[in-house]
Amino acid sequence: AALAVFLVAWDEMTKGERPQVWVLILAAALCGVATWMIQQKGFCLAAGLGVSMVCLLRARMLKPLVIFVGSYSLVALLPFAVFAAKHALPDVLFANYIWPMMSYSEINAAPYGFPIWDNYRFSTLETVYLMPYLLVAALPFVLPLAAWWTGRQWFRMAMLPYWVGAYALWFAELHRLDMGHLRNGVVLMAVLFYSICEAGGSDWLRRTGLVLTMCTIVVATVSCWASFACNQKLETRRGGTYVRGNSEVFAFLDAHTLAGDDVFVYPYQPIFYFM
């Protein structure tokens, strides 16, 4: 949403017109709201859009940039004022900034425990299932090559916010190099990639995009089927949940732990956070 609103101002700026102030304020405010939920994503997107303005406007950048940065800072810092009023600001800063910067990389050095290659047996279905994940990993490097192959129109100034925004969101997910984080970071890249496949004028790119789309549909279908297959209701200390197959882990936890006990679960299974 922030990028969509910013593109309205960007269109005016690329035409040499003065951007509407309310559009810049709204785009910056939406980046600030994103920062409330995922700090690094909102900040990186705002920084990327700010850099885009600097590259385009140069000598005329001061007023629009001050409006954008000021609006973003006002919204992004608003929660800190709320926590400060409740005398909780030190705890918030420690839990969300100080501790992650000091310890996050060490805590997350171990993989989540589900490497793709462990279950790959080179069958046709598994190859189809694997293709979207390979695209997610390769897209940051394949995307500029595909754009260069199809023509320089993808690198004109009007496209700069898409490129900067796409790589800003990707950069915001590099703190954890697993497929889940990388998938969340290439959303805008996927939009650019499929746009290039469709409008780039290359038959092989169109076919590539079509094949990858079909593979993604297969992955989505399998994932939905797996969710619907969880049809056995299980009552836990936290309430009811639905599982697939046996529930030996839940029974073990009920028998050997008390409410509030610390439990180490590996491989990664977020459902146990709530147990």
Image (cartoon, helix red, strand yellow):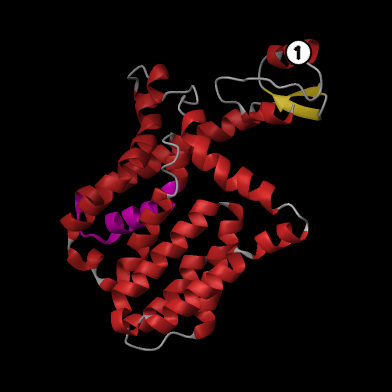
Identify the residue shown where x is 28% and y is 57%.
196
Name the dominant secondary structure of the magenta segment: helix
Q: Is residue 207 visible?
A: no
Left or right of 151 in this view: 69: right
Q: Nearer the viewer, residue 74 or 7?
A: 74
Relative to 201, say whether 128 is above or below.
Answer: above
Identify the residue shown where x is 56% and y is 44%.
98
The residue pinned by badge 1 equals 251
Relative to 54, say whether 235 is above or below.
Answer: above
Q: Nearer the viewer, residue 247 or 10?
A: 10
Relative to 147, say whether 264 is above or below.
Answer: above
Identify the residue shown where x is 56% and y is 47%.
97
- Residue 232 lies, in percent from the top left, at 73, 22
Q: Is residue 85 visible?
A: yes
Please, what secondary structure does the residue beneath circle 1 have?
Answer: helix
Q: Which residues are magenta?
A: 185-203
Q: Nearer the viewer, residue 14 or 260?
A: 260
Q: Amino acid at mark 1?
A: Ala
- Residue 122 lies, in percent from the top left, at 32, 19
Q: Nearer the viewer, residue 95 or 232?
A: 95
Relative to 251, say whether 199 is above or below.
Answer: below
| Residue 130 falls in image quadrant | top left
